[in-house]
Image (tube, grey):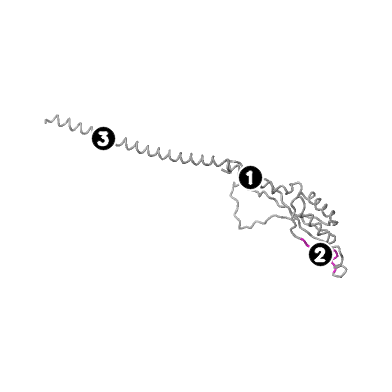
Amino acid sequence: MNMDEKKQLITLAVVCGVFFCVELVVGWNLSTENSITRTKLEELEKRKVSAQTKLNTIPEMRKKAADLSEIVSDYTAILPEIDEVRRDAFVDTITTLCKDSGLTILEAVPVSTEVRKSSRMVRPVPGQVAVHPPFQRHKYRFEMQGEFSQFHRFINSVESHPRFLRVDGVELYPLDQGEGLSSASDPKKRLAIEISTYVYDEVKVSVKEIQ
């Protein structure tokens, strides 16, 4: 084999080697890209399945929300409207019950139902929307006078009222604060009673929030 043939063989070998290296690099790059693409496709498929699962649960969640709303409506039907618990309206309601029972109402004052927040409680996060409870409590203190049988009739009328009214506390003492026997034997007494109720403010929940 002469020198020219050797050079040709060497050149051919070099060209083949370079071609092989190029093919190897290109193949490796393609394999890497395919792996990345496959990973992305798998992730997209997972997200698609998750989204489809959520979509499939929306009708069921809507039905549950409707069922719960119906249950709440049944329980809140006996609760008074907001206009019925304003001071004048509420006092008028109790005054009517007092008169029907033969009692005389002496005083009516609202009682605060706010719960004092401890300084140790976690402070709200800036930008966070405050959520108010759907049930708002309203409470009043009444002082009245009459006989015990009339008091008993009045309490029964409160507990059997079409609207929800709850007796929270009762104080019964002589009409006259003296310590004599006449004061103790007087059939008329003075009664201090606290009555509360609740108003329901329905909370609207969007489909987006329940997903």
Disc 3 marks which amino acid?
A: Phe
* Apparent side of residue 108 relative to residue 67 in the rendered image (left or right): right
Which mark, residue 99?
A: none
Front tag of 3 and 2: 2
Magenta stretch encompasses residue 191? no
CB-based contact (under 8 Å), mark 1 and mark 2: no
Magenta part of the chain? 170-178
Q: Write down the residue under mark 1.
A: 67
Q: Position of residue 180 (x, y in %)?
A: 86, 70
Relative to 10, is 133 on the left or the right?
right
Where is mark 3, residue-wise? 20
Residue drawn at x 45%, y 39% as measured from the top left: 45
* In magenta segment, residue 175: yes
Residue position for label 2: 173
- The image quadrant that residue 177 belongs to is bottom right
Mark 2: few/some/many CA within 10 Å (<14, 14-19, 20+): some
Crowding at dot 1, Cα within 10 Å, few <14 / some 14-19 / many 20+, comes out as few
Q: Position of residue 104 (x, y in %)?
A: 85, 57
